[in-house]
Image: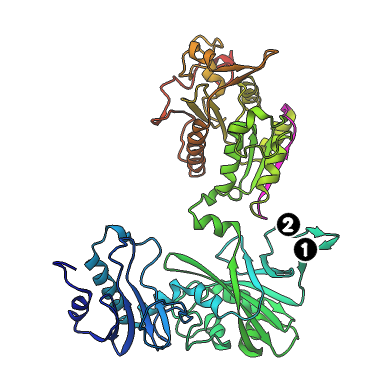
Amino acid sequence: MDNQITVKELLESYDEITIKKEITKEIFIIKLYEKEFLFVAPLHEDPTSSTAVFLYNDSGVSIPHIMLQDESCLNIKNLPQGKYRWVCLYENESVVNSIIPYEDKVIDAINRLLELLSMNNFEKEREFQKEFMFYWNNQSVGYNKFDIYLSQEQRFSKMCVYYNQYNVRLIERSLYLKDIDQRKNTKRIWVEHLESDAYYIPISDCRGILPPHRGHFWTVQDVRNIVYAKQIEHISDETYSALKNTYSNTRTNILVFGMHSNVMNIVFAVKLICKHAKKGSLMNKIQNDCIAVEPLETHRKDYLYLCKQIGNDIGIMKKKILIVGAGSLGSYVISEIVKNGATNVRIYDGDILEDENICRWAYGGLGKGSNKAKTIEFLLNLLHPEINVEGIPSNIDEKTILEEAQQSDLIIFTVGSSDIQLKFNKILKNNACTTPTIFVWLEAGGQYSHILIVNYSKKGCFECLYTNEKGDLINNRAQLNLVEDEKNYLIRNGCGGTRAAYGTSIILRTTAVLLNVIKKIQENEFAENILLDISPNDVKVSDTPFPMEACGCCGNKKLE
């Protein structure tokens, strides 16, 4: 290390550290606060490497972020015999090692270790809770994995218990999973287990609640401290009342606890084993009849949780969405709406997926020769058992659009035909549709696309775009391509058939803007009906005059 301070000199610069053994110029056994550690400095030749620290010959009972298992694959020559447990000093992707100078990496690791060993009880609790599920599942009992499905996180609720050969599902009773009744060779895949009662118990104050770890194993008292603690009220009065007024007559009860800590949601399940199978309140069984508890390996699987994990728009989760058109644009829109949080979608499209469609259809060649709506239904329902996508293999008609509008929370048109959009725009307006409606369309050439947001109780509709100042119907005024260019972008396939050329990049950016529009609709951000123009460079409110007073659908001309 020419002109640089050595790792040894850096370690010796700390009064708290004593070097017990130098293994190489970068690897040492050090003593810090009466505990010994293996300190492995970064590799000089690898700028992406970081310092690694291992607790040496110590169980680390009271220290968070110590791995529970001994390391057995440390390939270091002359390493003293003993037990080594890795110390987790960094969160994944929290540090870009390549841009940090070598000395700073070493100093940062030392400071993080000092901070870890100097934590007070409150700080230790916070860190243990960060890794709650790691500790919990590591100390779990039995071979089954318990998958949790919740529709909400704030209220006490009863849960159904289903078993298959390997897993157990604990499902909030208000939640329906589409695959729960599936069979294999006439035999049910999931069988309801009536011998166990299960309940979800929300924790409103998680102070003092630690996962089982070295030196601390959960007992009956840990559960009792949650539901009836004297110093901290971990549960709300409402939850406490529910526990007192809920009765069980089984020896085995499964409690699923949920709590929010350090900007993360934690859900863990524990089995309560009671002395008697006689009927009694759940609170009484916990306080007086429970003789043992068993931590259960817990994995939360509901769509609410999965969407929250990646920042999805949970506002559309319970909304019923109607989509008309499952072609190129529609296939992307439907797919992304569902993956963005929607669980209840109905699609209408009577077309068959042909070879010419596959390069700009969201699923490529999957379903070629089959109905587009039914293919999307099949593929999206595979994502999660809470998703209910229904594809109708026919084009929607006047009677059906009105029936669907009354049952839907949002209507989206992604059809390419202006005639169809004009037709249903007038039908919805004339029948005083109260459902927010979005028209989405692409211009040929792959440059421009548009989104029209319509509330039919206000001025402005799709026909406004085809109306001039005199009230005459003309070509779409929002079109940004020149008419000559539009003709050049048409692909003709004989017998009058045409297809607009526009590629896939326009579909992707239009879909992205649409997702943002849907979120703003849920948040009531649109005070008026609005037309958006989308180009490769920007998204803006259109300069096209809108609405039109002379519109024969929503304007003054209609009143004449």
Residue located beneath label 1 in the image: 189
67 and 276: which one is in front?
Answer: 67
Q: Position of residue 369 (x, y in %)?
A: 73, 33
Residue located beneath label 2 in the image: 179
Q: Position of residue 535 (x, y in %)?
A: 43, 28
Q: Which residues are magenta?
A: 385-398
Going by the numbered disc 2, the residue's amino acid type is Asp
Tag 2: Cα neighbours inside 10 Å, few (<14), some, or many (≥20)? some
Any part of residue 292 in sight: yes
387 shown above or below 284: above
Q: Secondary structure at mark 2?
A: loop
Q: In the picture, residue 556 is in which quadrant?
A: top right
Tag nearer the camera, 1 or 2? 1
374 shown above or below 240: above
Marks 1/2 in contact by CB < 8 Å: the verdict is: yes
Going by the numbered disc 1, the residue's amino acid type is Ile
Q: Earlier in the sequence, mark 1 or mark 2?
A: 2
Point out the residue furthest to the left here: 3
